[in-house]
Amino acid sequence: MSYAVYRVDLPHSPAAVMFVNGFVARDLAGFLWMWQKLFWIRSATAKAKGCMQVKAGICGANEVVMVSYWHCEDNLKEFFRGEPHRQMIQFVAKNPQSLCLYNEIYKPTYSGKYSHEPQGMATIYARA
C-alpha cells in the first residue's frame, strides 16, 4: 500500500490558529451537562464564522477534548462573544464546581505532515 505524504505552505506569519478546549466533569451535574451538550457544542463551533474544522476526542468517561482550526484569532474571539459560547459559560456560572475547563490557542510555526484529504491546518493552507 502506497500513499503520498505532503506538507502545507505556511505563510511567514500565519494568521490561522488551533484552539484546544477541554472539559472534565467533576460531579454528576457536570457529567450530565457535558454529555447532553457535547454534540451541540461541536456543531455550534463548526458552524462559527472562520472555523474550518472541529475534532472531538473522548479521553475518558468524564473528559472530552475538542480541537478546532480557525482562519484567524479574530474569528475565534468573535465566537467567544457569540450566543453559543455564552450558553456554554452560563452552566459554569451556575455550577462553578461541576466542570474543570481548559483552553489553549496555538499558532503554527511549521507545517505538519498529511496524507490523503486535508485535515487540520491543511484545510486552511495549500499543499506544498
Image (cartoon, rainbow, N blue to C red):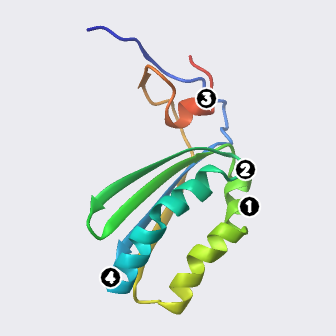
Residue that mark 3 sits on: 10
N-terminal of the pair, mark 2 or mark 3, is: 3
N-terminal of the pair, mark 1 or mark 3, is: 3
Disc 2, disc 1: CB below 8 Å?
Answer: yes
**Separation of marks 2 and 1 at Cα, in angstroms:** 8 Å
Q: In this view, does 63 lie above or below 119?
A: below
Left or right, 36 with reference to 86: left
Between circles 2 and 3, the one closer to the viewer is 2
Which residue is located at x 74 percent, y 61 percent?
A: 78
**Separation of marks 1 and 3 at Cα, in angstroms:** 23 Å
- Give the quadrant of residue 60: bottom left
Which residue is located at x 40 percent, y 11 percent?
A: 4
**Separation of marks 2 and 4 at Cα, in angstroms:** 31 Å
Give how far across and how far down residue 24 sits, in percent: 36, 72
Residue that mark 2 sits on: 49
N-terminal of the pair, mark 2 or mark 1, is: 2
Residue that mark 4 sits on: 26
